[in-house]
Amino acid sequence: MNTSMRRAAVAVAATTMAVSLAACGSAKESGEGTKESGAAKGDAIKVGLLLPENQTARYEKFDRPLIEKKVSELTNGKGKVEYANAKQDATLQTQQIDTMITNKVDVLIVDAVDSKAIAGGVKKAKEAGIPVVAFDRLAEGPIDAYTSFDNEEVGHVQGKALLGALGDKAKDGQIVMMNGAITDPNAALFKKGALAELKGKVNIGKEYDTKEWKPENANANMEAAISALGKDEIIGVYSANDGMAGGIITALKAGGFAKLPPVTGQDAELAGVQRIVAGEQYMSVYKPYAPEAAAAAEMAVLLAKGEKVTSVAQADVDSPTTKKIPAVLVPVVSLTKDNIKDTVIKDGVYTVAEICTPKYKAACDAIGLK
């Protein structure tokens, strides 16, 4: 994976990325055999969309509608999306792939619950002549294309932010690392990037791989860490995402912390942004969902029409089973109270009114969010 190229792009604004992806053009504009294969297949394609769970707000609020909208745009309103959510059940997701094969979809977009367990289903789809786009998580098996964020860079961004928050007190106590689920390959990349920043600069007192990314599991892990280390010893918490950060912060409050230590996050969930406004959570990682969804939809439409995705792909990535998968990796942004207005509000993810409910109005006023 050409990570150096991707990291250099982190500073690129989300809107710029969205424009550049849109400029890649539709299947009709790519000029790669579109007349012959596109005419043969036409715009009336069926795209199967399989998302992993519905506890994280992004999947239902952003990813699904964004992909459905882009598929419609690229197919003149004739393309249809068949949708299923696995609700964090890898076995159910495999069954959903079987259903999509039976329903004869033309292409699959899959965000895997378990990247290894999905491999057999991906193979069955390929054997049925259905190409597969891995979305957000790099599934194993014969994947045709992949779109996600630079996930190792996410960890770097989180690690740097935590170090910045700790300042010259970085070694005055211990931090707790709350990593994601081991079934998610992205979690390993987040951890790798974060450790590259943190190792040798902080003392890691406790580290957890959080089952199923569930906030309640992160809460239980944090309670155990407080019990083991003592509240006076914990100076910061690396949390791999916002949902877990919520569970962690609940445990910290219950643990009697007079002042909450800095806690990281990811996904810029509304509750996470509100905690940042209130000073309870230090930061999140804003991942512009629109360009990721646009890339997935565009590659899916091209593949459904029998065309190549090289007009869209910006890099190649390797999975444990497949080499040189054409990929789009979208840059990410460190989100703190200082840039809420220039990120999630500017890009239309949330309005000021959605963030600044009566509970958070005073905190919003204090940081000039009006």
Image (cartoon, rainbow, N blue to C red):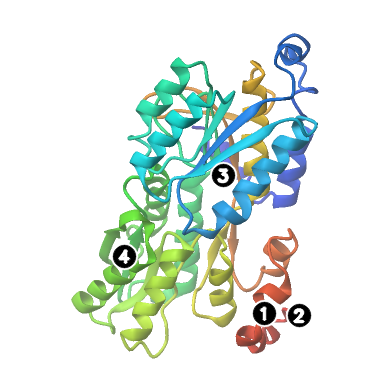
| Callout 1 touching callout 4 (CB < 8 Å) | no
Q: Which mark is residue 356?
A: 1
Q: Which residue type carries mark 1?
A: Cys
| Callout 2 touching callout 1 (CB < 8 Å) | yes
Could you tell me which secondary element the residue under label 4 belongs to?
helix
Instruction: Tell me if residue 30 comes above or below residue 15 in the rendering.
Output: above
Which residue in the protein does label 2 denote?
370
Which residue in the protein does label 4 denote?
217
Disc 1/disc 4 C-alpha distance (Å): 28 Å
Could you tell me which secondary element the residue under label 1 belongs to?
loop
Instruction: Tell me if residue 274 comes above or below residue 55 in the rendering.
Output: below
Disc 4 packing (10 Å; few <14; some 14–19; many ≥20): some
Q: Which one is in front in this view, the residue at disc 4 or the one at disc 2?
A: 4
Q: Is residue 24 visible?
A: no
**Can you give x and y, in whole percent of width and height, for residue 33 in the image?**
73, 11
Looking at the image, tell me whether mark 3 or mark 4 is earlier in sequence order: 3
Looking at the image, tell me whether mark 1 or mark 4 is earlier in sequence order: 4
Looking at the image, tell me whether mark 1 or mark 3 is earlier in sequence order: 3
Q: Considering the image in quadrants, where does the C terminus appear?
A: bottom right
Q: Is residue 83 left or right of residue 78?
A: left
Residue at image coords 38%, 57%: 213
Q: Which one is in front in this view, the residue at disc 2 or the one at disc 1?
A: 1
Could you tell me which secondary element the residue under label 3 belongs to?
helix
Q: Is residue 303 left or right of residue 352?
A: left
Could you tell me which secondary element the residue under label 2 belongs to?
loop
Disc 1/disc 3 C-alpha distance (Å): 33 Å
